[in-house]
Every structure is written in C-alpha cells, then in structure tokens.
Amino acid sequence: MKNDPQQTAPPNEIKQIFTDYKNSIFSIQNDLEFWRGFLDRAIKDYPLTDNSIYSSLFHAYDYDYSTNSGYLCLDKEVFKIKVPDLNNKREEFFGWIMNLSVLRAYNSIEILLLRSIQKSYYPTMEDPITGKKQTDLVQNEIKKYLKSNSLKISTKNNEHILEFLKHKEPKIKTFVNHYLNVDLKTNWENFFRLLSLLRNIIVHHGMIIQPDIHNVIKSKAKDVFQRFFSLKESSDGHSILFPTEKDFRNLITYINSLTLTLYKLIFGENSYDFIGLISPDIKNK
C-alpha cells in the first residue's frame, strides 16, 4: 500500500470495489459468449423453411384524456421473421446488445473510479455506491481539488476524474500517455475519452453517430474505433454505431486493463496481487 495518511480503508473494502466491478464485467463477457454460441448452434439446427416463425404489430392504447379508458390501436405494418432471416436478425440483436454492454461497462468503470477515489483520498466520506448524494459529495471534492490547484474542471465525458487522478498520482499521468499496444497509436487517456463518447452516443443519441462526433472520435482514437466498431446505415440514412462482434472480447480486455491499472495505481500497488490476480507467465517462471 502507498504511504498516504489519508488512505485508511481496510483491505477487504478496497478489494470489494474490484469484486463488484469484476462481477459486472464478467457477466457481460460470459453472457455474450454463451448466447452467441448457443444461438449460432440453434439457428444452424433449425428446420429449413420459408415460413414465418415470428410476427408482431406495433400497438398502443389511445387513451381519452378525461377518463381512464382507451382503445387498442394497431399499425398496418407487420414485422415478421423467417428462417432465412435468422442470421441477420441475430447479428442485429447482438449489435445493440453489445452497444448496451459498452454502456454498462462504462458505468462500471465510473463507479470503480469514484469508489476508489473516496476510499483512498476521502475515507471519512460515505461510499458513493450508496446513493446519489454520496456520489455528488465525492464529485464536489474532486472539483474543489482541481479548482484549488488551478486545474481545468471539465465534467464533460468525466474528464475531471482523469485530470484529478493524473495530478494526484504521477504514475497515472505517465501510464495514460502510453499507447494501448505497439500496433495502435491511441493512448489510454484517449481510449477513456472514446469510451465516454460512446457512452453519450448510446445514451443520448440512440446509437446514431453524427458527422461532427465521428470527426472527434477520429481525432482521438481512430485506430481503436476502426478495430472494434463500424458504422451501418439505417433505413432513414443515419450512421449507427455497430460493434465488431469477433473483436468485442478484446475490447473488454482493454477496458479491464485500463480500469484495473488505474485502480492499482490509486492504491499505490505495483501489481494485481492485492486483488488475487496472478499472471500465469510470472507464476511459471
């Protein structure tokens, strides 16, 4: 542990932050891997026929404003799925499931970082996972620290959190300037920004990427984006964010590596030993 008088959280509380993050991320990875393989096999073994195996109509009740009664109204267009459509429909389904997984992963990163900051630097405060009020108090302390040190306060895409950590921990400042890999030119800081941008696209823009946002992404993390995502044109001409299914597992690995390296450095650790993650390569030496 680092020699910091503020850092008084018991080891079990520190490890619990990792455990909660692991459970969230691991369920994403396992669910996607299992259901993708299961559906592939199920579709392959499905009896070949051109018959519709599913159909539905868009509907809503038209309520009278003055009473609690209404009439069921149906759209004329019928949605159908036939056996020859199954592979395409599976691909579309996993596209938006993977997008929602990026959102869930980003939320898990944010929670881990705020909890780690609270435990390491503001141990007398309550754990931000317990509620919005507690989260806001930690956020306010981060902003107060940045202001007192004449540092930029930009809450857009959680940039203030990374700025806080870079100033608090010189090793983090060094780490986030490194490239993700030898074959990539995006560093860890811009990877974090990319994840933040993707989160906003998924939550606030219905997975539609506008040209100006796409340009920002290309300026920050073009090679990473092109490796793990593509754009597909919707029926109304919009560019839709679409994860690359075969590489999604590697994206999760990069997310884990970023998150846990920040987590490790916040608590002054040199390896993942303190949370029980051991490298087989090191163990076998």
Image (cartoon, rainbow, N blue to C red):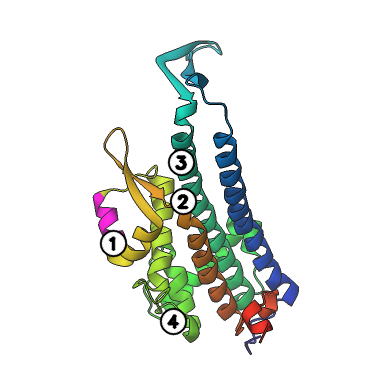
Residue 156 in view, yes or no: no
Eye-nearest disc, 1 or 2: 2
Q: CA distance from mark 2 to mark 4?
A: 32 Å
- Residue at the farthest bottom position: 3
Q: Residue 176's image quarter?
A: bottom left
- What residue is disc 4 on? 173
Of the image marks 1 and 2, the number of the one nearer the N terminus? 1
From the viewer's perspective, is residue 85 above or below residue 37?
A: above
The C terminus appears in which quarter of the rendering?
bottom right
* Residue pointed to by mark 2: 245
Query: Disc 1 to disc 2, how far (Cα)?
Result: 20 Å
Residue type, label 1: Lys
Q: Nearer the viewer, mark 4 or mark 3?
A: 3
Residue at 33%, 65% (x, y): give it.
223
Q: Mark 3 or mark 1, which is nearer the start of the sequence?
A: 3
Type of amino acid at the residue the image marks with label 3: Glu
Which residue was labeled with disc 1? 218
Crowding near the residue tagged with mark 4, few <14, some 14–19, many ≥20 C-alpha atoms within 10 Å: some
Residues tagged 1 and 2 counted as in contact (Cβ below 8 A): no
Over which residues does the magenta segment extend?
211-217
What separation in Å lies between label 4 and label 1 (alpha carbons)? 23 Å
